[in-house]
Image (spheres, rainbow, N blue to C red):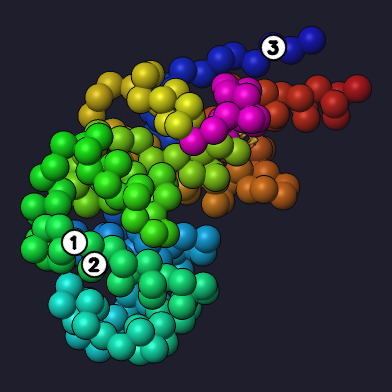
Amino acid sequence: MFQPQHSSVLTVYEQLLAAFGPRHWWPGESKLEIIVGAILTQGVSWKNVEKAITNLKQTGNLDFSALLNMEDQLLSELIHSTCYHRQKTRKLKSFLGWVCDRYEGDLEQMLDNPTAELRRELLQLWGIGPETADSILLYAGNHLVFVVDAYTKRIFTRMGSVPQEIDYQRLQSYFQENLPPQPELYNEYHALLVKLGAEYCKKQRPQCGTCPISSGCRYYQEQENNTRR
Ligand code: SF4
C-alpha cells in the first residue's frame, strides 16, 4: 500500500509560496482597519467584510472615535453584509471601549504589550476568541503567534499531519514548534493556507488533482488508491 511522503511544516509552506506567491496580508491600510476586519470576518467570507469596510470608509467612519461614538443602529447597518451584524456591533464597541479605558484609546500602546499578556487580555473580551485575538496580535501587532482557523485544521488533518480531534492550542503549538520564529513567515503561511482552503481544499469536493501539496497528502493518496482498486 502507498505510504504518503510526510511533508514537513516548512516544506508545505515552501510549496504553497512557490505555487501562489506572496499574498500580501492582512488587507488593511491601518492597524484599526486590520483589527476591525479581524472582528468582522468571524464566520463570514472576506468579500462580506470588504463591503462593510468600504461602507465605513466611504462614510468617514473608519476611525477610532467615530466607531466608538456611533449609534449602534447605524454601525449595524454599515456592517450589515458581515451577518450577525448586531453581535459584531457589540463586539466592536466592546473592544474599542476597552482600548479607550485601558489604553487611553491608543492601539499602539495596547499592541506594545508582551504577547502572552496581551493575548490573555484580548481573550477576556466579549466576542474575541483565539483566532481573532491571534489575528490581531500577528497582523496588527507583528507578534509571534501563529493563526489557525478551520482551513488550517482541515488541510492538516486531511494531510495526516495532525489528529482530527486536535484543539486550537495544540494545532497552534504544532506550527510554532516546527517553524522558525518569524512573524513574517507566520503572516504569509496563514494567508497561503486561507487561499488553499478556500480554492483547493474545500469542505466538499477538494480539488486534489491541482493542489500544490498533494504529493504529501494522505487524503489524496487514499483517494488515488481507491480509484485504482
Ligand atoms: S491534496 Fe486534496 S485533501 Fe490534500 S490538501 Fe490538497 S486539496 Fe486538500
Q: Which residues are magenta?
A: 155-168
Please report contact status of discs 1 and 3: CB closer than 8 Å, yes or no. no
Residue 125: tell me if it is visible. yes
- On residue 3, the disc is 3
- Of the numbered discs 2 and 3, the one sitting upstream in the chain is 3
Q: Nearer the viewer, residue 121 or 32?
A: 121
Name the residue rendered at 16%, 36% in the picture. 114
- Whole-percent x and y of residue 193? 46, 41
Quarter-wise, where is residue 60 in the image?
bottom left
Instruction: Point out the image quarter for the C terminus.
Output: top right
Please report contact status of discs 1 and 2: CB closer than 8 Å, yes or no. yes
Q: Nearer the viewer, residue 25 or 74?
A: 74
Q: CA distance from mark 2 to mark 3?
A: 51 Å
Main SS type for the magenta part? loop
Q: Nearer the viewer, mark 1 or mark 3?
A: 1
Name the residue rendered at 46%, 18% in the picture. 8
Name the residue rendered at 54%, 52% in the picture. 198
Query: Please, what is the three-letter code of the amino acid marked with disc 1?
Result: Val
